[in-house]
Image (cartoon, grey):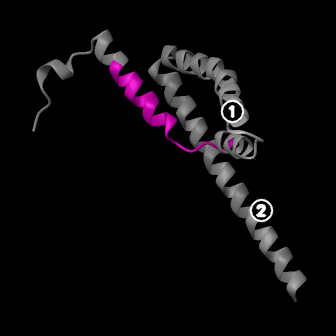
Amino acid sequence: MAMPAPLLKNTPVLRAVGTTIAGAINGLMPCTMTMAMAVLATTAPSPAAGMGVMLAFGAGTLPSMLFASFLFGKLGPRLRGWFLKGAALVVIAAGVSTLWSGGKLYLHMYQLAA
């Protein structure tokens, strides 16, 4: 099944729609900082204070996220590929570090129980 011809054109409107959809999907991905702020907001003394925490967090992170998105979009494909490979290595290193820390904690707890 082939895509309709109008959807294959690379127009500014279709790029904007695609970028908006990708941004909305990205907003649904869990983020440690967002989860931490959500916990802080749920422990706020009132719903209005919790809403204020989340609004302040969103307003504070929006400029940097927009700047990073704009800058990343201006990079050439080759440089963007290098950045993606570097990000993948950072994620792998973070995973290995987490597993290592978890193993050390397990061994420590095992020795305490013995």
Prevailing secondary structure of the magenta residues: helix
The mark that comes first in sequence, 1 or 2, is 1
Residue at figure coordinates x 49%, y 40% from the top left: 28
Return the residue nearer the eye: 26 or 81.
26
Q: Amino acid at mark 1?
A: Ala
Say above or below: 44 vs 66.
below
Q: Where is residue 3, by image quadrant?
A: top left
Say above or below: 22 vs 43.
above
Instruction: State the CA–CA distance, disc 1 to disc 2.
Output: 38 Å
Q: Where is residue 47, by image quadrant?
A: top right
Label 1, secondary structure: give it.
helix
Q: Position of residue 23 (x, y in %)?
A: 46, 28
Residue at figure coordinates x 73%, y 33% from the top left: 49
Say which residue label 2 marks.
Answer: 101
Say few, some or many: other residues with alpha carbon within 10 Å of mark 2 (under 14 / 14 to 19 / 20 or more). few
Evaluate if marks 1 and 2 touch, with contact meaning CB atoms under 8 Å apart: no
Q: Where is residue 52, by image quadrant?
A: top right
Label 2, secondary structure: give it.
helix
Say which residue label 1 marks.
Answer: 48
Residue at figure coordinates x 49%, y 18% from the top left: 73
Q: Amino acid at mark 2?
A: Ser
| Chain part drawn in magenta | 17-33
Q: Position of residue 29 (x, y in %)?
A: 52, 42
